[in-house]
């Protein structure tokens, strides 16, 4: 009788411990929670903290935006008006906050190309793409009015209000004065706006005096 009892105890001791729990007809390992799938709703461009978890749309890829900016800078070194025009929106304006000036961007650059020699920049490394600062609309609420300076002294003008998909790129420049003096300001700031084909430059901000 004792031999039978010991055999029964040995069988129990040697059997593997059960690590599963019953959940209806399904068996799940211990420690694994089973929750219903979470619904996030339609993707949105932005959200507020009070809205909880929200599925956001993928922001524009940095390389697409930066490529537009570097292509524009390369067009400047070639004094290529048509290449520059193709990167600008139809109502792109050049802004100079220090002097309170605002004019059609392609006209401003075409005039600069006739008065100054930008081809001398073609073989100079006067910018570094690693130093570009890229800010999306939700991040540059304070940066954009600061860039506009006196042009926004009495509040942001209606013409300079931004859209949700706008991107700001701040480009620090490093270049010696050319034979004709300064060719560019210390910084170029580009406001890019989404279009059907990607992005185009909508505003250019620069501290650069050019006598008409």
Image (cartoon, rainbow, N blue to C red):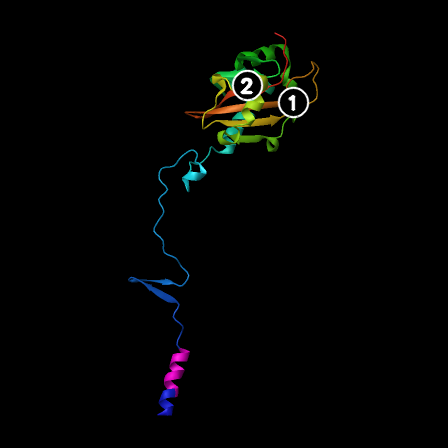
Q: Main secondary structure of the magenta part?
A: helix
Quadrant hosting residue 11: bottom left
Rendered position, 27 above or below 102: below
> Does the rendering let one see residue 74?
no
Quadrant hosting residue 180: top right
Q: Residue 203 at x, y = what percent?
A: 52, 20
Considering depth in this image, is 157 or 163 the residue closer to the camera?
Answer: 157
Going by the image, does 64 lie left or right of 126?
left
From which residue to which does the magenta span run?
A: 6-14
Name the element at disc 2.
Answer: helix
Going by the image, does 41 lie left or right of 147?
left
Q: How many marks?
A: 2
Q: Label 1, label 2: how many angstroms apart (C-alpha)?
A: 20 Å
Circle number at residue 152: 2
For the C terminus, give its image quadrant: top right
Name the element at disc 1.
Answer: loop
Q: Tell me which residue sits at (60%, 26%) in the image.
A: 171
Rendered position, 36 above or below 129: below
């Amino acid at each position: 009788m004792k031999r039978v009892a010991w055999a029964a105890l040995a069988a129990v001791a040697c059997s593997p411990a059960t690590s599963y729990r019953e959940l209806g007809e399904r068996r799940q390992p211990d420690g694994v929670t089973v929750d219903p799938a979470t619904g996030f709703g339609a993707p949105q461009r932005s959200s507020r903290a009070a809205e909880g978890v929200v599925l956001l749309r993928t922001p524009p890829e940095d390389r697409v935006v930066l490529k537009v900016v570097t292509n524009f800078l390369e067009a400047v070194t070639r004094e290529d008006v048509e290449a520059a025009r193709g990167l600008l929106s139809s109502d792109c304006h050049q802004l100079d906050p220090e002097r309170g000036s605002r004019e059609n961007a392609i006209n401003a650059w075409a005039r600069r190309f006739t008065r100054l020699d930008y081809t001398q920049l073609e073989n100079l490394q006067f910018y570094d793409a690693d130093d570009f600062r890229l800010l999306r609309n939700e991040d540059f609420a304070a940066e954009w009015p600061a860039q506009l300076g006196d042009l926004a002294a009495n509040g942001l003008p209606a013409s300079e209000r931004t859209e949700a998909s706008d991107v700001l790129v701040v480009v620090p420049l490093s270049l010696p004065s050319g034979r004709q003096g300064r060719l560019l300001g210390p910084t170029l700031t580009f406001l890019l706006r989404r279009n059907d084909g990607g992005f185009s430059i909508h505003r250019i901000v620069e501290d650069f005096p050019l006598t008409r």
